Image (cartoon, helix red, strand yellow):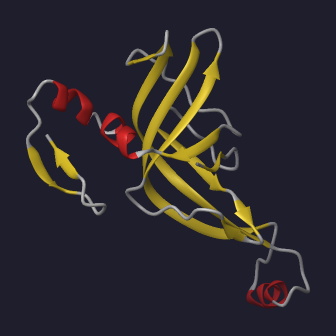
C-alpha cells in the first residue's frame, strides 16, 4: 500500500530520509507512527533496482504554504485563507538492498532515495528482512530479547 513519497522538502541521505504522507481532504490516507517499518524501492542507474527499509523515528505535522501567526491560522481554519496541513515522517534506514535476478542482495550502493519515490508500509514478511532478523532466523541463532508494540518478537 502506497502511503506517500520521499519528500524533497527536507534533504535526505542514505541513512535518513523523509516521507510526506499522501492525503485526501487534508487528512493522511494512512497515518504512520513511531516504530512503523516502511519500504522504498527505486531505480538507480546503472546499478539497477534498490530497496531501502527504514523505521519511523519521528512524525511531524505542519502547515504547508500557510499561516505564520495565530491570527492567520484562525483564518485558515475558517477557510478564509489558503493553508494545507502536511505530515512528514523521519525514517532511519535499517537495510539497503539491491535487487539482482529476482534476489535481494546486501551490496546496494549507499545513495539517498530520490524525491518522489513511492513509499509503502513494509509487509509482515518484510519486517524481519528490514530489521535483519531474517539472517538470524535462517542461521538458527536468533535470541528473543523483547516484543515490539505490534506484538512481534525482537531478536539479537
Position above or below: 89 against 79: above
Residue 94 lies left or right of residue 45; in this view the side is: left
Please name whichever residue, 156 or 82, is drawn nearer the observer in this view of the structure.
156
Residue 148 lies left or right of residue 16; in this view the side is: left
Q: Quadrant of residue 131?
A: top left
Quarter occupied by the C terminus: top left
Question: Residue 22: x, y in percent?
Answer: 69, 57
Residue 134 lies left or right of residue 59; in this view the side is: left
Question: Residue 130: x, y in percent?
Answer: 36, 37
Q: Which residue is rendered at x = 14% and y = 55% of the image?
A: 146
Q: Quadrant of residue 36?
A: bottom left
Residue 144 lies left or right of residue 105; in this view the side is: left
Question: Residue 100: x, y in percent?
Answer: 49, 11
Q: How many numbered discs sit on the rendered protein? A: 0
Q: Which residue is rendered at x = 11% and y = 36% of the image?
A: 142
Q: Which residue is rendered at x = 40% and y = 14% of the image?
A: 107
Question: Residue 79: x, y in percent?
Answer: 87, 85
Q: Which residue is rendered at x = 59% and y = 44% of the image?
A: 119
Position above or below: 78 against 101: below
Please name whichever residue, 22 or 6, is drawn nearer the observer in this view of the structure.
22
Position above or below: 89 against 70: above
Please name whichever residue, 92 or 146, is drawn nearer the observer in this view of the structure.
146
Which residue is the extreme one toward the right? 80
Amino acid at each position: 500500500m502506497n502511503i506517500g513519497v520521499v519528500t524533497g522538502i527536507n534533504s535526505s541521505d542514505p541513512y535518513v530520509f523523509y516521507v510526506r504522507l499522501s492525503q485526501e481532504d487534508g487528512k493522511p490516507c494512512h497515518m504512520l507512527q513511531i516504530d512503523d517499518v516502511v519500504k522504498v524501492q527505486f531505480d538507480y542507474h546503472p546499478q539497477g533496482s534498490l530497496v531501502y527499509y527504514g523505521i519511523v523515528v519521528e512524525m511531524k505535522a505542519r502547515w504547508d504554504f500557510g499561516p505564520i501567526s495565530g491570527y492567520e491560522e484562525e483564518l485558515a481554519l475558517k477557510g478564509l485563507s489558503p493553508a494545507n496541513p502536511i505530515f512528514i515522517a523521519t525514517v532511519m534506514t535499517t537495510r539497503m538492498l539491491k535487487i539482482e535476478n529476482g534476489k535481494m542482495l546486501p551490496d546496494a550502493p549507499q545513495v539517498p532515495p530520490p524525491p518522489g519515490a513511492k513509499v509503502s508500509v513494509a509487509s509482515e514478511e518484510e519486517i524481519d528482512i528490514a530489521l535483519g532478523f531474517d539472517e538470524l532466523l535462517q542461521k538458527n541463532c536468533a535470541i528473543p530479547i523483547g516484543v515490539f508494540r505490534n506484538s512481534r518478537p525482537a531478536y539479537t
